[in-house]
């Protein structure tokens, strides 16, 4: 073998991995822009160059610079070797699978026909699933190396989640390889070439749905990031383990898709009613069940729940949303009455119309602002800084004499 052969041998599996890494900033840019619009974070949509917003294209560069200069902190009590190597195991397992995925047929290079696949192995499908399964070791080692029981419990729980969803992914993928009669991925691709109807997504559509849902769930993406009470408990336990306890909690919940379909009590579907209650009321209960014991262990703490002015004004629509937000007031008073003597303060803020960045960007913004000002006893609409300042005050020691209150912050829209 000469130098050209060696170069081809090395670059065939390496180029797909490098190409994947180059696509990551683009994917993150799309996700950050979408999340920024939904969460009213203008940064990902404004970071640009020399005053030009550039559609937020400066965000991937900012992220890269942040990672380069981010301090690498290793606590004293951890197993330094395992603590350092565990994220590399997860990263390796995620990237190495691309080495066997075909991304083309072949190209001529220096008189040689080079297949556009890193390694055309006969067990390519099994290789991908096996390498993906290695991430479990990295997750468990991360928890084990911390020498902290809460981190270990979180690692074990995450590992169990990965394994459970990988079972569904493997089962869904099995149909593809059975239909192609091969585990070699080049043959799987070739079996779909004659017609669009032979694309595996067509005859095995339900398998595709299962595989996609499992992939989102395994990587803890929304809506699987906080899917159950154990997830919320793990979040609080992790914060307590890292910071030595939980002193404050700000609980916010909203399902905008459900809110748009919240019409009136006669027409609303009961499934939609249950969904609104699950997000806007049950979610708060789940958070409180985790936060209060941790605060009691610290001798007290401050809780602020997000309610809404809709809880106090009669509305012809949104009965589920208004009812859930009113229930948050009762829940807030219950916590203050039950644990106030033990040092726990629990209040709620009830914002009215708030000019978030997302609302300001809609074409109907002038009409919305004018209508909101007519209902208010003030000269401007509220913004997110108004809410943040009130929450910060209620959590701080300056607000320690306030407990069990639902405070409207709506420019005087609701007078009571």
Image (cartoon, helix red, strand yellow):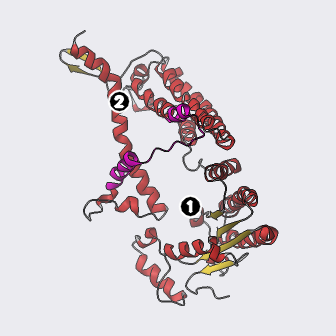
Q: Quadrant of residue 10?
A: top left
Asked whether residue 301 is drawn in magenta, I would say no
Of pointers 2 and 1, the one earlier in the residue sequence = 2
* Circle 2: element type: helix
User: Which residue position is annotated with label 2?
Assistant: 16
Asked whether residue 66 is drawn in magenta, I would say yes
Q: Where is residue 319 in the image (x, y as percent from the top left)?
A: 67, 72
- Spatial CA span between label 2 and label 1: 38 Å
**Extreme residue toward the front, this view:** 76
**Extreme residue toward the top, this view:** 1
Answer whether residue 51 is visible to the viewer in this image.
yes
Magenta region: 58-87
Q: Quadrant of residue 247?
A: bottom right
Q: Position of residue 25 (x, y in %)?
A: 36, 45
Q: Residue at image x 46%, y 79%? A: 368
Q: Where is residue 86 in the image (x, y as percent from the top left)?
A: 53, 33
- Classed neighbour count for the residue bearing mark 1: other residues with Cα under 10 Å, few (<14), some (14–19), many (≥20): few
Q: Residue at image x 33%, y 34%? A: 19
């Amino acid at each position: 073998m000469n130098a050209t052969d060696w170069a081809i041998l090395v670059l065939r599996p390496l180029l797909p991995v490098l190409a994947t890494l180059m696509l990551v900033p683009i994917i993150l840019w799309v996700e950050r822009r979408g999340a920024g619009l939904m969460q009213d974070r203008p940064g990902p949509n404004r970071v640009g160059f020399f005053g030009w917003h550039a559609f937020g294209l400066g965000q991937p560069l900012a992220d890269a610079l942040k990672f380069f200069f981010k301090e690498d902190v290793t606590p004293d009590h951890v197993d330094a070797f395992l603590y350092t190597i565990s994220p590399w195991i997860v990263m390796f397992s995620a990237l190495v699978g691309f080495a066997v995925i075909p991304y083309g047929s072949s190209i001529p290079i220096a008189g040689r026909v080079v297949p556009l696949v890193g390694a055309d192995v006969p067990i390519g499908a099994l290789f991908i699933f096996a390498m993906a399964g290695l991430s479990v070791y990295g997750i468990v080692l991360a928890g084990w190396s911390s020498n902290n029981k809460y981190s270990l419990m979180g690692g074990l729980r995450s590992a169990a989640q990965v394994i459970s969803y990988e079972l569904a992914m493997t089962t869904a993928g099995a149909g593809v390889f059975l239909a192609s009669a091969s585990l070699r991925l080049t043959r799987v691709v070739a079996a779909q070439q004659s017609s669009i109807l032979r694309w595996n997504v067509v005859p095995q559509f339900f398998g595709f749905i299962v595989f996609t849902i499992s992939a989102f769930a395994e990587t803890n993406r929304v809506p699987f990031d906080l899917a159950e009470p154990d997830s919320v408990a793990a979040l609080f336990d992790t914060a307590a383990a890292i910071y030595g306890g939980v002193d404050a909690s700000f609980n916010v919940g909203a399902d905008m898709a459900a809110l748009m379909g919240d019409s009136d009590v006669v027409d609303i579907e009961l499934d939609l009613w249950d969904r609104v209650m699950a997000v806007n009321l049950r979610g708060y209960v789940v958070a409180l069940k985790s936060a209060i014991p941790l605060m009691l262990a610290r001798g007290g703490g401050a809780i602020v729940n997000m309610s809404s002015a809709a809880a106090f004004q009669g509305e012809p629509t949104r009965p589920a949303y208004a009812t859930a937000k009113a229930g948050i007031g009762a829940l807030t008073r219950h916590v203050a009455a039950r644990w106030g003597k033990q040092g726990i303060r629990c209040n709620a803020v009830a914002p009215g119309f708030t000019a978030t960045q997302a609302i300001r960007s809609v074409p109907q913004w002038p009409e919305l602002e004018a209508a909101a000002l007519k209902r208010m006893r003030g000269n401007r609409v509220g913004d997110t800084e108004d809410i943040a300042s009130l929450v910060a005050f209620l959590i701080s020691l300056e607000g320690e004499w306030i407990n069990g209150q639902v405070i409207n912050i709506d420019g005087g829209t609701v007078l009571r």
